[in-house]
Image (cartoon, rainbow, N blue to C red):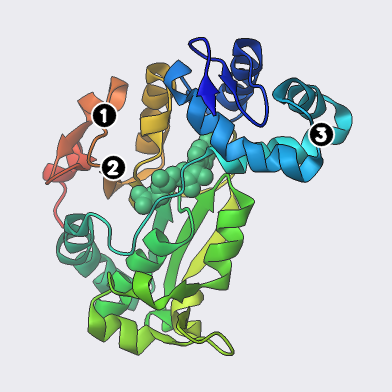
Amino acid sequence: MTEVAQTEVTGEFHLSAGDFRQISAIMHAETGVLLDESKNNLVYSRLAKRLRLLRLKNFSEYCAFIESEDGAGERDAMIAALTTNVTRFFRESHHFEHLKKTILPPLIEQAKQGGKIRFWSAACSSGQEPYSMALTVLSLLPDAAKYDVKILATDIDPNMLAFGEAGIYDAALMADIPAELGRRWFAPAKDQPGFFAAGEELRRLVTFRKLNLIGDWPMQGKFHAIFCRNVVIYFDDPTKTKIWDRMVRVMDAKAALYIGHSERLGGKAEQLLRSDGITTYRHKSSMTVPA
Ligand SMILES: C[S@@+](CC[C@H](N)C(=O)[O-])C[C@H]1O[C@@H](n2cnc3c(N)ncnc32)[C@H](O)[C@@H]1O
């Protein structure tokens, strides 16, 4: 693979500057993800296998295909290939500690009196984030299934949602889960040596749904905790600001919003929320609302 001009890549296939611009414009319009010119090699390497599979000669044929009526499915495959899905169980563990120590105790008391607990993992990738939220709930409320506890897990990528729904993980990934929680809520996967499956009590707390963060949000009601981590980092500034503003509107008065370690709030969210720990935010008004 050789880089010819700034955005042109040649090799097995030719990716012209125009092809790159077309692909990045579609990604931006459909997902909010910004692919600047430095991402040309990433675009080439992630999509080359799609071209091989479709037996196309170059990226201009690929661009023509994704713009055609028959190429609608391939547009989704392209989006899936170009999004970054890196995640881990209990990633940025301070967020789960805050959830456990600050957010959950009053909610659990309310749930025991018939109240709801509603959490959202807003770019859940392959499920490690929402399952870590569910494991945090189970660590304090092992019989959570008896109460009205729901964790919504959404992502734009259907492959990731299917992965999360299956709830089967390589033993190496399980190392990030506190041993006691892993032993209690996962079991060796049937017919898959070296893999572990989320147990029924864990899975039933989490619902996976496709949702594009820059599209409609059909959910009703407010959330007590939102994890929106390591996704808006890929968006442009106006899109980031819009997402944070929308997040504030779906947060319950005492909710927490957890964001990625390299992300910053902007817009109204910055004025309405206060820091309550590392990349952890709550409504300013929650300071005066008794717990
Ligand atoms: C790096 S992962 C973050 C996973 C998890 N939140 C974490 O921090 O470990 C980013 C996820 O955002 C998803 N994504 C990208 N654009 C999106 C959009 N417009 N709407 C919803 N999800 C999106 C990707 O599919 C990917 O699974």
Q: Mark 2 is on which residue type? A: Ile
Residue at 79 percent of width and 35 percent of height: 72
Mark 3–mark 1 Cα distance, whole angstroms, equals 36 Å
Q: Is mark 1 within 8 Å of ligand 1?
A: no
- Quadrant in which residue 57 is drawn: top right
Q: In this view, does 184 lie to the left or right of 150?
A: left
Chain-order first, disc 3 or disc 1: 3
* Numbered disc 1: secondary structure: loop
Total marks shown come to 3
Residue at 15 percent of width and 65 percent of height: 101
Mark 3–mark 2 Cα distance, whole angstroms, equals 35 Å
Q: Mark 3 is on which residue type? A: Gly
* Vertical comparison of 71 with 174: above or below: above
Q: Mark 1 points at which residue?
A: 265
Q: Do the residues labelled 2 and 1 touch (CB within 8 Å)?
A: yes
Instruction: Point out residue 157 in the picture as x, y percentages from the top left corner.
Output: 59, 47
* Vertical comparison of 75 with 286: above or below: above
Q: In the image shown, does 98 or 129 lie closer to the viewer?
A: 129
Mark 2–mark 1 Cα distance, whole angstroms, equals 8 Å
Q: Mark 2 points at which residue?
A: 259
* Numbered disc 3: secondary structure: helix
**Which-is-in-front pick, marks 3 and 2?**
3
Instruction: Point out residue 256 in the picture as x, y percentages from the top left corner.
Output: 26, 48
Residue at 74 percent of width and 26 percent of height: 58
Q: Mark 1 is on which residue type? A: Leu
User: Residue 4 shows which numbered tag?
Assistant: none
In the rendered image, the quadrant that contains the C terminus is: bottom left
User: Residue 71 shows which numbered tag?
Assistant: 3
